[in-house]
Amino acid sequence: MIRRIGFAAALFSLALASGCAKGGNGVIPPAVTVDVAITSPNNVSSNAIYPTQSLTLTATVSNSVSTAVSWSLSGPGTLTPVTPATTPATATYVAPGAAGAATITATLVSNTAITGPLALSVIDITTEVTPATLSVGNGLTQQFTAVAVPDDAPQTFNWTCTANGASCASFVQDPNVSGLAYYKAQDNCGSNCVQIAATSTIDSSGCLTTPKNCTTARVSLVPSSSTNATAVVGTFTASNGSITSGVEDELTSTGWAQPSITGGSYVPISASDPNSNNAGTLTLTTGAFPNRFQVVINSAGSIQMIESDGHGAGSGTAQVSAVSSIFKGSQTFAFGFTGVDSSGKRVGYVGVLPMTGNGTSGTITGGQIDVNDNGNSSNGICGTAPCAVTGSYLSNGNGSWHLALSSPVTMNFDFFISSGSANKATPLTFYAISTDPSVNPAVSGTMVLQDSTQTYNNADFNGNSVSALTGVSGANANVALIVGTTDGNGAFSGQFDQNNAGSILSDIAFPAAGSNNYIYAASGAIGRYTFQMLGDPTASPVVAPLPFVLYASGQNRGFLLDQSSASVMTGTMSPQGKGSGNLAASELPGTYAGATTCSATAAVDPIAANLLLTFANAGACTAECVNGTIYDSANPSGVTATGANPSYAIQVNGNGTIALTAPSAQNFVIYAVDTSGCANQGVVCTIQDFLMMDVDKTNLNPSIIFAQQ
């Protein structure tokens, strides 16, 4: 071995000394190569070719005067060189009608030892129908969308709908959009009895031969109306479109009142409207305002709503009530409340309430609260945060409960049971409102059952989340959306968009390279954390992040409150569903009901909307398209919404954009929250809901819009 190494070194030295290396002057000429690539369609992966797909291949010869090549194919499909030969040489490959593997090789004619192989994988087309699992009220119509993967596969489909094995009574495919169909619940069956599938028009086997390549929607039929709890703080009972009874808490400038709801109705818009999404008008007979709302209802009966009685501009949601029997025993609720103090200044609360009782009455001990009152975390409610909370609760006997807090100061609230269960994936939720605004701040908000299986340390906060924040900026609004990752060790990273009264920060990555100033930290097993958010690490000089406190209701979930700014930014953090980090535009199509959530200022004009997102549409829009109807105070009957071409885009981490051209040019950022499906780490996901935020500089009063299938 020693002699061999020395001999090689001697040869190398002689070669350099004699100056006889090929190419002269000791320079070795670059190697001649042949590279084959797919040049049409653009951005096609060689590992994801769909059956019968046609590709244009280009052979690029480098470092050779002669560029002529010959073509060969190993495996299924057909290969046709373009004649007369082009420079560089091109060929057309047509994939076989079934999955398989092939290798295409371009060989340099002047030196057949030099070749350029390209391996291709032909994969089955997989289809996804959304929403995949849901309940539809009898007589209601639900829209379904279909997407084919790979993304560049033809978005054309053959639909089927069966109810207990027989054809559905009312099911039609849209005549203009192949990936869209409408089901009206007129079948006589129950749980998961309706199955809706869409197969690619170039897949003759459909779902029967290869069901693994086809996701079928399963629909359960339920009564069209039920008892609902509303974000307007109340509860009402509906039957066949008529409101029969209810009660609501009203908090106005004249004080608090709890009138009965003695009647009302829900009147849908014309069923012939292809974008109806079960939109209509909801009236509640209370003897006061608000009493009429423009609403958009999803298939399960959940409502997105805005006031349309001409006496205000409020917005919110209504959901099917959970049964009250699950509210008992020892349960801890995280909460987030927002409103104004006795001087009319913005105030926010977050905290936890450990509640022990029989569901009718009980006590609260060991709770905590943080408060930001007009930029002050030390104030007349909470001296030095966090402050201890004690109190009690008692049923009012009319579908509401009264919450009486004795410390840190005397405060009184009413709350109503909204949706949810004891399951940590769908936690029990209450809507709450203060009942003594003349003494204490006039606030309302949400209470969510805390997941008792978590230990609420840094390690328990580990994963992806989406946060929505709303605040004020003088007389205008300050809103932000954040997608972030907690690593279980105290580091927080991600991206955010912010519209602070028309001052826009777009797609800001944090922290800056080499910085660790975006952190989070647990502070006790009660579920309290501190976070660093917003700021601007890209500015010069850097704008430091704001400190926030979060009270967790579960892993990567909870209520947020900024600790120091006069904006008093409040909001929620929600876990981002599976597939985050590998999301795409093809996973967004569907019919979404949307509405403005909590508005920081009365200057915000809230909206309700239905948005129909389709992928590779037909007609005027030939890519990712948006259609639908928007309702606001200026258009209580609705105005058509359409998008540019393409209308929307999604990055792999779930944030993206929507651009509308009508009713006016508007630009939104969107952040995907809940997803389902997500086989193979993000392939064939369904984005079930997302958050939207206006990012036009001309909009000084943006809002956060929640959109849900």
Image (cartoon, rainbow, N blue to C red):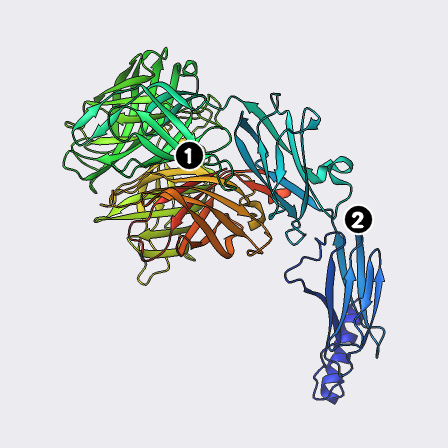
Horizontal and vertical percent for residue 319? Answer: 42, 27
| Foreground pick, 235 / 286 | 286
Query: SS of the residue at dot 2?
Result: loop
Numbered disc in front, either 1 or 2: 1
- Image position, residue 175 (x, y; %): 62, 46
Q: Is residue 491 above or below residue 528?
A: below
Q: Label 1 belongs to which residue? A: 280
Query: In which quadrant of the rendered view does residue 334 lie?
Result: top left
Counting other residues with Cα less than 10 Å from the Cα at mark 1, is it few (<14), some (14-19), or many (20 or more)?
some
* Structural crowding at the residue carrying mark 2, measured as other residues with C-alpha within 10 Å and reported as few (<14), some (14–19) or many (≥20): some
**Eyeballing the image, is 62 above or below 339?**
below
In the rendered structure, which disc, 1 or 2, sits on the residue that comes first in sequence? 2
Relative to the observer, which residue lies in front, 408 or 162? Answer: 162
* Amino acid of disc 2: Ala
User: Can the viewer see residue 678?
Assistant: no
Q: Quadrant of the N terminus?
A: bottom right
Tell me: residue 81, above or below residue 291.
below
Image point (55%, 30%), residue name: 134
Q: Secondary structure at mark 1?
A: strand
Residue 98 tag number: 2
Give me the disc on residue 206: none
